[in-house]
Image (tube, rainbow, N blue to C red):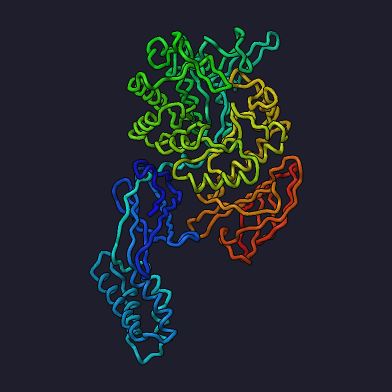
């Protein structure tokens, strides 16, 4: 009972990723006092059953079990839970009590002999035949059970031999087998789980201002291509582009979201469509499709993927308004309703109404997505998906997955949890989260637990530290240390994280007090940044972001989601958590993050580590290697730390075993 992960009673597939251990949990119980066992049997996309994984007791709740299944190929998988009465474990339990107490001694040995003979017979004729050494081990145990001339303790020791225990565990006797399932789960490619994202506006990269007239000339794909090298040098994996389509001229917004644009104002890229075309066109100032193809090709050379914004909305002069007026909502006065998110108003945008012509909208959107896929786009960041029907997304994502299962979709839905989870359930691969607004120790701890072990079967988080829409007060007033804190927290707390350009320059001024909008927001105007000058001056966070991405690539533990452990400290501003991953050589990779959340004050405290969660004994010690500074310390369960935000507000520690 209570099987997980199961989404929508098994009607949808749970989230999984190639190479990521997925926990399968269930309550397994039976009548009486005999012992039981259970295992998880996964079936891959080709219908082949994989080796079963034995379930182990989980947590402190009785009868709760867990096993981890790690898919190795992408596609649609299923799992079943097989449970059975375990006569061998029952005998081991009873014999361990009765024989030392002198109760039913020979009866217990007789039962052992009969069970072991069943083992030998079953596997002599079964598909998993025992090798000669295993047969000899079982035969020797049978002889010990029969040999009344040997001391009782010696006979029992032979039946409790660790090698025999391992053999019986690997080849169990199953009685009263029951099967639950199958339950579906979908394994996606690794980028669905792990990646570092960088967002920039192509029109700002390479843009120039005429010193005499003040007029700004837009950047192009060809000038923006030059920025790709620096993004790759910083260790990012995905370059996310806001909409690159023609921008509406009707109701165009001016700087800082004003309603009075000048003749040279560029407008918001999210106000899509003009006389130059709609979602299937490129803004003339950015270049041509050939230029875009060259941009994508250069990104591939640098091992970067391009993510393109998919914003299903239209400017008042979008071609759809004429050719497909049924796509929109007409108000009682005959006007088309523009978008609103009170108190925000978007007079330059018409939202799509899926009630009028759902079939026509579906066809058109699929056409557009396929068009950009044909130009090398394999990731889409979807704007406001929560304002469109879940049934539409379920259909669209399934259609894309049917032909191109490597294409990924990131949901930009800052909304109620049920909708965010619903979007993940119907197929979204990643989700923006509430991370931006989690700044206190307790709420961050709770959120890390939530995304890693409570909603992980539904949605994968992407911890963006900022966006063109969101400049949190923590960054507005925290100074440079705040930017380091949030970057360290995002980069180690989630396998996917992202920054919006300007973060490394500590851009922090809001349009007005109490607002999360940037002053001179890049959403409404071109923003020229002198990257080379700031790099030369050393007044940039780029080296720190680079180091964070290097650490993420070096440590498999930081590439997983479901492996977070919260530890404690004696200071309410010092957060401590760890991540642990198994390595192919049988060892493990462990990273501990110790972060001072107070960007204004030095904090001194003692951190207390859950040593077994690190793969260590309570009294063990280890070398704590700070991946940021390169320093080493000897750590154990209790450790003093001092974190100065003016120097380094975070320790990112790799655990190195002592011999």
On the question of residue 509 being in view, the answer is yes
Answer above or below: position of 93 versus 451.
below
Instruction: Tell me what residue is drawn at x 50 percent, y 56 percent.
Output: 582
Pinpoint residue 209: horizontal percent, then vertical percent.
66, 14
Which residue is at a point 51% across and 17% down the rendered structure image? 271
Residue 300 shows up from this direction: no
Q: In this view, does 174 lie above or below 273?
A: below
Please provide percent x and percent y for residue 546.
62, 39
Q: Determine the residue positioned at 35% across, 77% down.
A: 137
Q: In which quarter of the image is the C terminus?
A: bottom right
Looking at the rendered image, the quarter that the N terminus falls into is: bottom left
Please give the name of the residue rendered at 70% of the width and 29% of the height, measured from the top-left corner.
Answer: 534
Outermost residue on the left side: it is: 125
Instruction: From the viewer's side, name the closer residue of 576 and 531.
Output: 576
The relative height of residue 135 versus residue 302 in the rendered view (above or below) is: below
For the residue pair 504 and 454, the one nearer the viewer reads as 454
Q: Name which quarter of the figure residue 426 lies in.
A: top left
576 sits left or right of 69 in the view: right
In this figure, what is the number of numbered marks?
0
Q: Is residue 428 shown left or right of residue 84?
A: right
Q: Quadrant of residue 235?
A: top right
> In x, y percent, where is residue 565?
57, 53
User: From this viewpoint, which residue is outermost toward the bottom?
Assistant: 149
Q: In which quarter of the image is residue 599?
A: top right
Residue 473: image x %, image y %?
A: 67, 32
């Amino acid at each position: 009972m209570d099987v997980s992960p199961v989404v929508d009673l098994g009607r949808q597939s749970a989230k999984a990723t190639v190479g990521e251990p997925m926990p399968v949990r269930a309550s397994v119980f039976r009548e009486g006092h005999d012992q039981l066992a259970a295992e998880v049997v996964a079936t891959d996309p080709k219908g082949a059953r994989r080796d079963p994984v034995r379930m182990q007791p989980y947590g402190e709740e009785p009868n709760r079990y867990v096993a981890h299944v790690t898919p190795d190929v992408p596609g649609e998988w299923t799992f079943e839970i097989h449970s059975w009465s375990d006569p061998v474990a029952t005998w081991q339990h009873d014999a361990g009590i009765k024989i030392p107490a002198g109760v039913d001694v020979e009866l217990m040995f007789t039962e052992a002999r009969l069970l072991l003979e069943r083992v030998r017979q079953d596997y002599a004729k079964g598909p998993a035949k025992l090798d000669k050494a295993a047969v000899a081990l079982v035969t020797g145990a049978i002889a010990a059970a029969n040999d009344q001339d040997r001391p009782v303790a010696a006979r029992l020791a032979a039946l409790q031999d660790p090698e025999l225990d391992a053999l019986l565990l690997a080849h169990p006797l199953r009685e009263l087998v029951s099967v639950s399932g199958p339950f579906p789960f979908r394994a996606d490619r690794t980028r669905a789980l792990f990646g570092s994202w960088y967002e920039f506006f192509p029109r700002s990269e390479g843009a120039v201002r005429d010193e005499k007239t003040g007029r700004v000339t837009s950047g192009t794909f060809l000038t923006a291509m030059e920025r790709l090298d620096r993004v790759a040098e910083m260790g990012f994996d995905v370059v996310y582009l806001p909409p690159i389509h023609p921008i509406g001229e009707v109701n165009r917004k001016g700087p800082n979201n004003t309603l009075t644009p000048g003749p040279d104002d560029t407008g918001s890229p999210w106000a899509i469509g003009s006389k130059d075309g709609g979602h299937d066109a490129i803004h003339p100032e950015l270049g041509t499709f050939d230029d875009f193809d060259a941009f994508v090709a250069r990104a591939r050379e640098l091992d970067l993927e391009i993510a393109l914004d998919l914003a299903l909305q239209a400017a008042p002069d979008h071609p759809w308004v004429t050719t497909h007026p049924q796509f929109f909502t007409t108000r009682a006065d005959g006007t088309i309703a523009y978008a609103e998110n009170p108190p925000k108003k978007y007079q330059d945008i018409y939202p799509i109404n899926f009630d009028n012509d759902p079939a026509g909208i579906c066809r058109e959107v699929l056409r557009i997505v396929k068009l950009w896929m044909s130009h090398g786009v394999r990731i889409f960041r979807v704007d406001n998906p929560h304002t469109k029907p879940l049934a539409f997304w379920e259909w669209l994502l399934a259609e894309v997955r049917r032909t191109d299962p490597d294409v990924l979709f990131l949901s930009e839905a800052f909304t109620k949890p049920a909708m965010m989870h619903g979007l993940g359930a119907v197929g979204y691969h990643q989700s923006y989260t509430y991370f931006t607004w989690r700044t206190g120790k307790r709420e961050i701890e709770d959120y890390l637990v939530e995304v890693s072990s409570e909603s992980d079967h539904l949605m994968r988080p992407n911890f963006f530290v900022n966006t063109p829409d969101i400049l949190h007060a923590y960054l507005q007033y925290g100074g440079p240390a705040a930017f380091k804190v949030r970057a360290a927290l995002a980069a180690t707390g989630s396998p996917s994280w992202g920054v919006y350009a300007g973060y490394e320059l500590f851009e922090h001024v809001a349009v007005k007090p109490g607002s999360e909008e940037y002053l001179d927001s890049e959403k409404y105007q071109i923003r020229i940044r002198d990257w080379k000058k700031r790099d030369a001056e050393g007044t940039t966070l780029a080296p720190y972001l680079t180091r964070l991405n290097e650490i993420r690539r070096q440590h498999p533990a930081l590439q997983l989601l479901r492996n977070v452990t919260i530890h404690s400290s004696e200071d309410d501003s010092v957060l401590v958590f760890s991540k642990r991953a198994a390595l192919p050589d049988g060892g493990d990779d462990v990273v501990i993050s110790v972060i001072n959340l107070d960007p204004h004050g030095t904090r001194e405290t003692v951190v207390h580590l859950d040593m077994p969660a690190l793969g260590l004994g309570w009294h063990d010690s280890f070398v704590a290697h700070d991946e940021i500074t390169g320093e080493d310390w000897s750590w154990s369960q209790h450790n003093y730390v001092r974190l100065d935000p003016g120097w380094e507000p975070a320790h990112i520690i790799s655990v190195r075993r002592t011999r």
